[in-house]
Image (cartoon, grey):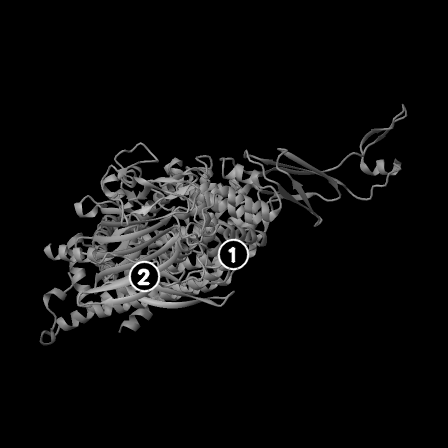
Amino acid sequence: MLKKCILFLTLLATATTVFSQIKIFDKPLSPRIANYAMKARLFPETKIVEASYVLNWWNASNDTIRELQFHLYLNAFKNEKSTFIRESGGRHRSGEIKLEKENWGFIDVLSMKVLDGEELKSKIEFIHPDDDNADDQTVIRIVLSKPILPSQSIQISCEFRSKLPRVYARTGFSDDQDDFFLVGQWFPKIGVWRNGAWNCHQFHSQTEFFADFGVYDMELTVPKQYIVGANAVLVNKKETDSLAVYTFHQEDVIDAVWTASSKFTEIKQKVTIASTGREVEVTYLLSPGREVYKDRLFAIATAMFNYFDEWYGAYPYPNLTIVDPPINETMTAGGMEYPTLITTGSFFSSARSNDFLGLNWPEVVAFHEFAHNYFQSMVASNEFEEPWLDEGFTTYAEHRALERFEKDGKISGGYGNIFGLNFSSLAYHRLSYLPRPKSGIVGEKAWMIPENFYQTAAYSKPVLLLTTLQNYLGEETMNKVMHTYFERWKFRHPQTKDFIAAVNDVTGQDFNWFFEQFVYSNKTVDFEISSIRAFEIKDQMGWFGDTEEKTFAEDNNERKEDSTETHTEKRYRSVIFVRNNGDAFFPTTILIRFANGDSVIEKWDGKENPKQFTYNKESKAISACVDPEKIIVLDLKLSNNAKVVDPEMAGISRYTLRFLFWLQCMFQTLTMFV
Amino acid sequence: MIFSIFARSLRTTLQQKKMMSLLWAISFLFAFPGFWITHRTLNSYFGGRQVAGEWLHQFNLSYLLEMINDLPSLIPATNALFFGSALLFLVVTIFLTGGIVGKLIQAVSGDSSNGEGFAPSFFSLSGKFFFRILRVFLWTTLLSLVSFAFMMIGGYAGLITAALIAVWIMTSDITKIRLVSDDSGKVTKTYFSSFIWVMKNIPSVALVYLLNFFLLVMTFALYKFLDNALIANGILKIFLMVVIHQMFVFFRGAIRIQMFTSAILLWHAKLKTMASVASNPSENLLDEQTQPA
């Protein structure tokens, strides 16, 4: 213990942390409001990080700021009274907090003061801006005796101790022999001054990101055998007899995270972005047994940089770190996003794609987490207040990447190809949306969304509505929209209205009707061809004539002979009813095919409901299909969009007869012990 | 010796057309309700819609998911039907095994069961040995489940599980042959002495089963090749697909019969070897444990 104290004092003594002179970008990409120079040391035995930083924060507003607010996110893991534990029940994905005392986490501010000035620690006050949980300690407020004037900077030095929790939700240590640490949300992080107030939310069960951009310098000290990765460029590495000191630097990011393990395999790869020829250095930190995935991860990384460059804009950073955590932590530490560092998960897959049940899990997770570098890291929306701008846009990007990756022949199926059945990502997201289309609203604040709807509201429905928008606008226009949104809002804090403005500006049309229905309300759309009928027009029989001298025609031939009209062929009346069973409108088209090969495309604004289409033609209508191009993937039931007069049922027999075969095979397998 | 046993057993198996047909028929019969209900449900749900036409060219999982979402009781009902059919199929298969083994023993020994027709003697043997075969099945299932514990270790320990399960299947087959052959009621004793016999003769027993396994793999490869080559997007092609499927099911049943036949021949061959060694005590190198019960 004495040794540790000496080391700690040594650390503090050298805590005159300085900002690096290294530059990554010639010109700042962001306003660089919150800039940290940090020193930290990991004590693996106690799972403690002893650290200090100097924060250089500047008031970019026109307001005079009289108090500061900071996140102390590790306190979410402090006890069962935190808002996070109350909301989540101590569970996250498949992980669950374990009750042993070493498994809990917390953060203590040991000292805080204005550099060369006011002492602040004694003024720390816990607040709970989102709920009435007075026991939550994830946000602090400090009232300043000297306010910060517009455009003025403040430098704050802080010493803190972070006790890492056992990782079950985003951050912490792995408690078995894997010796793995994911050090995220680990330092007192200043909130965002926005619209004349602090935007500094508590740590919630589902959300965690909203921060200002800045420059991060990190000096991380670990036992020598540990390999460290961070969301920054490695500037220097020094080693003593027992310790290794890593120095990292990053610019224009919203967060700092690092990982350490004595068992990582480190692989570096240069990925070239085709459009510019620029190279990004990708560092893979692979846990034991995960090295076999490297080729698969290489292919994913190469694809994702190029896809996202094409669809959204340039990835400006020179680095990306991809961490594949230990197998037992795939669901707890895997699948996390930080600027320029992501954690993946290859748990449900094998080294080659389409092996184990054909699941494309590494692709799904890697595309998703990398997409967060665009949506929430660079385009820094507020995950707490508008989660769909974060997870929704990211999942949409993931879906597009999976579709393209499949088109490029790299995978089969989106989420996978299970027993020959293509399980597309759209099918997955429809599966999430269809049972609960009315359960909540996408544009709601995260903590106001019902727990059972969060996945749908933040992830699945946004994929469906953005894909619907893409199908409606066309891929080229959608790319322009996304480019415009990205270029306008990268390194800033957009809101939904800013995305709507980008859509309206690029298309030159007012798309508020779309967002009002599908983002700000729970309205649904369900088109249906409710009936299609065709019958011969028999208007040749009966009494004819306007005067008392009427003539009676008994059949078509007699009538034709007497008539001045010439009827050379039969005519048919076809009547098609189309309806929308939902309460949202959507302009669409209806394709009607006739027996003689003719077809008609009708436009329907979707407001007149139901709508009837009638045709008197020499040929019968044989099929009708609303939304024939399958633009509206938000449609609750796509299977009722088309009706045919003479249905071809062989397609069903094809699969049910195969099902018969599967059943026989399963029965035979079941009796192999007999 | 093993290859000649294998070749002879193949010839004997191929003569068991009624038995092969019976195994195919019961698999069809028990799977049919599941198929028919699924077929009717899909037809009724998608009736008049264009879905079936689209499925003829490409399967769209979304439509199926919509149906499952619309009919929440469908999955529990299908599960109940499947497990019910599977359980009944299992019981019937256990029942028929006595008849299969008995008739195969007769066929191998050239006994034509005193001119009795196939069905009466087959079902008589099935009924006679039902409970004994059931107990053998329970032992094999229990030991196989215990063997799965090795899979918890992870890594290559899974191979130990696979090897153990193979041993239990071989033991189970030899036990059934001995119970029917000797008309013995001592199931447990026979099971464990069969296990010892299998372990003592593991090279020849394993080789026979490996040859049968190879036959199964080849049959599967041929089925897979034909199935992949055929895109069933028309009535005739769907009919061809069904023929390919049912041929595979038929031959898979035949391979199960072949496993019994080859095991019977192997058992008899070993029995003869031991008898000839026993008739010449100076050459008797076998210990008591290898003597058949």
The image quadrant where one finds the C terminus of chain A is bottom left
Query: Which amino acid type is shown beneath numbered disc 2?
Result: Phe
Q: Along the polypeptide, which appears first: circle 2 or circle 1?
A: 2
Query: Which amino acid type is shown beneath numbered disc 1?
Result: Trp
* Chain for numbered disc 2: A
Q: Under tag 2, what secondary structure?
A: strand
* Residue B39 at x, y percent in the picture: 48, 45
* Residue A135 at x, y percent in the picture: 25, 35
Q: What residue is at 29 percent from the left and 40 percent from the top?
A: A140
Q: What residue is at 57 percent from the left and 49 percent from the top?
A: A471
Q: Are marks 2 and 1 on the same chain?
A: yes
State how far apart marks 2 and 1 are (Cα). 30 Å
Label 2 or label 1, whichever lies nearer to me, is: 2
Query: How many neighbours does mark 2 have within 10 angstroms: few (below 14), some (14-19), or many (20 or more)?
Result: many
Query: How many neighbours does mark 1 have within 10 angstroms: few (below 14), some (14-19), or many (20 or more)?
Result: many
* Residue B86 at x, y percent in the picture: 34, 47
Q: Quadrant of residue A617?
A: top right
**Vertical side of A416 occupied by A558: above or below:** above
* Residue A346 at x, y percent in the picture: 34, 58
Regarding residue A656, the answer to whether it shows in the image is no
- The residue to which callout 2 is attached is A248
The image quadrant where one finds the N terminus of chain A is bottom left
Q: Which mark is residue A311?
A: 1
In front here: B70 or A365? Answer: A365
Regarding residue A303, the answer to whether it shows in the image is yes
